[in-house]
Image: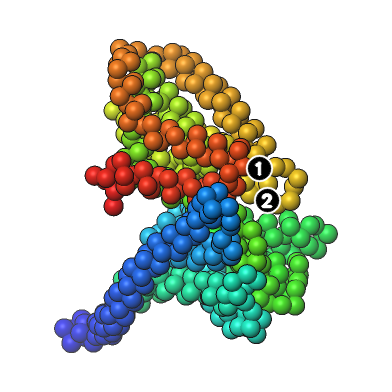
Amino acid sequence: MSTRDEAAIGTPAIRDLTSAARLARDVGRVARGLGRLSDIAAAITRVGLIITTAIALGALVANVFTRNALGMSIEGSEEVYRFAFLWVIWLGVSLAVKRGAVTQFTLFSHHGPAWWQRSVRTFSWASVAVLLAYACVRATQYVNSDLVRSGHSTLLAVPSVYPVASMTVGYYLISLHYLARAAGEAPALLALGRRAAWPVATAIVGALALATAVWLGMAGVLAVGGSWLVALGVIFVTLTLAGTPIIFMLSIVGIIAFLPSFLGLEFYPVVDPLAPFRTTQGAMGLDHGGSLIVILAFLVTAGVMNASGMSERLIAFAASLVGHLRGGMAYVAQLTSAVASGISGAATADAAIMTPLLVPAMEREGYRRDVAAAVVAGASIKGAIGPLSVMFIVYATLGTGATVNALLLSGLAAVLLLLVFQMATVYVVVRRMDMLAKRRFAGWGTVGRTGVSAFPVLAIPVVILGGLFSGVFTATEAAAIAAIYALVVACLLYTSRCV
């Protein structure tokens, strides 16, 4: 074959690569622009998140102060913290998306043959893309509806558009961050030119096949007279295992459930297409309640404790008491979690307080990383049932007849029992596995010094529980007071690390 023939054959391929490279370059410019826009939006969102968090927690604490010091409540304070909390939720979710800090399972999306992984991921992210497009349209319609534009709050006459707009802004920010991420990955794919055709085609065909299988599964359940919930469970499980972020998976299932018709299937059809969005905003605090703000308050508390060094002092005190025992830091984890359960109110917050410090400390003591992580994870479950349990507080607000104080008091007993049994487990395991020799006790002087240093932290559950059981403040207000107390203590007593 002559050189001219080879050139003639190679020319189309060269042209294809040149064209692909040019397209990839142009898309890259767009991606960089979207990336900068996403970064700017995230920076503004952080400021807005700090402001709305301060307003929400401040309104709660201010009402406690005026009610007990001045004998009067601040009219409308509940509306202030509920509306501010709506903005906290949506701004926080958008930042979590920007950071990639959304919860998802990757069992199917990151295991198996390459074509399978591509198909599962395409199905998952196509579902998210459809959701966000639909949600942006409906959220825009919601905020521009006559009911919202003419409505206002009962006490402060705040126009309804202000709290409702949090959802619309949130969905647009989330869409921007995902669009910037997708655009950033596109140039590498486009640069492949025709070589990308086969992977893209198999991903799309595989995703369509998976979507068809899901629809057939749901239709089959309904055809044999199965429960609507079971049919919805098919897409619930599929999206979860496909790696769809949990928060968006729940949104997809909720919207499908209320659609008049989902590709010929009906579950709980409603005429109003905005019903899922009204229900979501109402449950999170637009219409009533707002008890979910306790989650925000406890996360703030955990963050302040870690940033200020308060958690380090708490762990040092626990270590001076039980760190010399055989098993050392495993006992410290149990004791620390018992105290933290009276501050954090959630297992995740307990884990956030302990993990950065205790896991490395346990590794230095000789524990394997997986064992250290398991010990801390097991210890942190006290937060979920502790005397400031978020679950208990939310459960009591659902009209179940159970009082908050009774539930929280039962949580205190449960934590003490769990502490005893978990420490007994540590005692048995370290001896059976012949782990870690006993060390010399640091002395009561060290216990006293670390106790004095940790006293402001130890006082948090005492103040909160005392105020709760004496009726000074409610459980929701207790969470806000814990966060403000931690922030004040951090800035006044631990000024070197107060930001």
Q: Position of residue 200 (x, y in %)?
A: 44, 71
Residue 367 visible at all:
no
Q: Which of marks 2 and 1 is nearer the N terminus?
A: 2
Amino acid tagged 2? Thr
Q: Which residue is drawn at 62% across and 46% down?
A: 393
Q: Is residue 420 above or below residue 249?
A: above
Determine the residue positioned at 48% across, 47% down. Answer: 481
Residue 84: % across, % down: 51, 65
| 277 or 396, nearer to the observer | 396
Question: Are dots 2 and 1 in contact, CB under 8 Å?
Answer: yes
Which quarter of the rendering shows the N terminus? bottom left
Q: What element carries label 1?
A: helix
Q: Toward the viewer: 161 or 364?
A: 161
In the image, is 251 to the left or to the right of 305?
right
* Residue positioned most to the front: 70
Quarter where residue 320 is shown: top left
**Where 336 falls versus 199 (above or below)?**
above
Marking on residue 404: 1
Residue 397: mark in rendering: 2
Q: Which residue is drawn at 58% across and 44% down?
A: 472
| Outermost residue to the left | 3
Up-down relation of residue 198 to residue 384 (above or below): below
User: Dot 2: what SS?
Assistant: loop
Instruction: Identify which residue, 369 or 110, lies in the foreground.
Output: 369
